[in-house]
Amino acid sequence: MTAAVAPVAGTVRPGWEGVREAFARGQARDPGAAQLAVHRHGRLVVDLWSPGTAAPGGPPFGPDSVGVLMSVSKGAVAVCAHLLAERGRLELDAPVARYWPEFAAAGKEGTTVADLLAHRAGLPAFADEAAGVTGPALFDRDARVTALAAMRPVWEPGTAFLYHALTYGHLVGEVVRRVSGVSVGEFLAREVAGPLGLDLWFGLPRREEHRFVPQFAVRPAPTAGQIAAAVGGLGLAPGDRLAIALRASAAELADATEAFGTRAGRAGEFPAAGGIGNARSLSRLYAALIGLVDGTRLLSPATVDRARSPHTDHLPPPAPLDRLDGPDRSRFGLGFELPRPGEPLLGEGSFGHAGAGGRLGMAHPASGLAVGYVCTAMSWEPSAGPDPRWTEWTAAVREAAGIPEAP
């Protein structure tokens, strides 16, 4: 029986034909559109897209289309911080309060920039701990930054690890703003996207709006009742500060995802999840982290090695979640995800960041590989293991590059 394949357009270099075939097989199980780009030693070797059905009423999908990157955005935020560190303007082991004095409030005077990058800061949500409600308006950056500066951590910073799904962008982004004098979106445009010619933004310019293709969910977003029940199932009392944070984060993620479907949502800077871009630009960004791309390299090998060194493997989740900790827990360096069974990236030594629904940007320094994948159908569920759309083409990319299978 012949395996189903999706229609695919684009080009591959000789020796990479298997990636095209694998991408077509992977997209056959997906109603949405997608792009896949791969750089090897700074050269684009795979540039593919599948039009899918796009979103109802959406514009045609092609190689220059751009979409919401969700948490792949966090990798771009981390790049901005590491650039400042490499230039001697930011010390990652220094207290955040050195650059953002107001942040020292409520017991956070010892929290380091590295704690923010590694999701160890104890500030996983914009929650009002007294009222148990979500924080300021989604795109009111000043109000959200002020709230974070005043907030008491849910756990002692540096002693536990829990993914900061939405606060990460405002926390690290505000440090970038305090050090550089411009917002993280402006810094990205000036120091990263501009020099590399990337289609990558925090705040989509109106002139680029015609290229935007919306995402769509393949299953309904969880209701407030479902979120509350899930949090309750973790053994947390409703009024527990961690329970409040988890409920708030889940509810705000749903709100933010909906907001990104509006012009106002795309125009605002929401750096944890609201980046806009395409696969070519993600691949080119990661290629420039590990080598030269048209004469430009963003970070030194030493900086990249530090960024991808494990910084959470020794830490449990905050109690009582530590009792539920499993073998496939997330792993982080300084701002980047590291390989694990449910998200293997390109194998040992690789680093990158995935995004809700299945987006992915990553690099494997030893082989010179950099990859970007952008999709419109939000179908990936992290708890279910690797996205089945990934598994076909990641294996083909590894084979083409000669990366051995993990033992």
Image (spheres, rainbow, N blue to C red):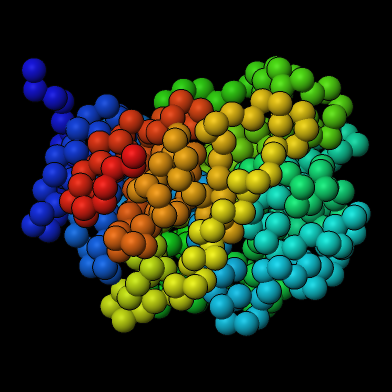
Q: Is residue 386 left or right of residue 175?
A: left
Question: Can you see residue 169?
Answer: no
Which quarter of the rendering shows the C terminus? top left
Picture coordinates of residue 319, whole percent (x, y): 78, 32
Picture coordinates of residue 117, whole percent (x, y): 64, 58
Q: Residue furthest front?
A: 407
Q: Is residue 296 above or below residue 39?
A: below
Picture coordinates of residue 393, whole percent (x, y): 25, 41
Which residue occupies 33% across, 75% down? 292
On the image, which quarter does residue 61 sit in? top left
Q: Is residue 258 left or right of residue 348?
A: right
On the image, which quarter does residue 134 sit in? top right
Which residue occupies 83% across, 23% down? 238
Which residue occupies 8% across, 57% down? 14
User: Relative to the observer, which residue lies in front, 90 or 211?
Assistant: 90
Q: Is residue 371 above or below residue 180?
A: above
Question: Can you see residue 358?
Answer: yes
Which residue occupies 25% across, 63% down? 40
Numbered disc total:
0
On the image, which quarter does residue 251 sit in? top right
Picture coordinates of residue 268, whole percent (x, y): 58, 56
Which quarter of the rendering shows the N terminus? top left
Q: Is residue 277 left or right of residue 393?
A: right
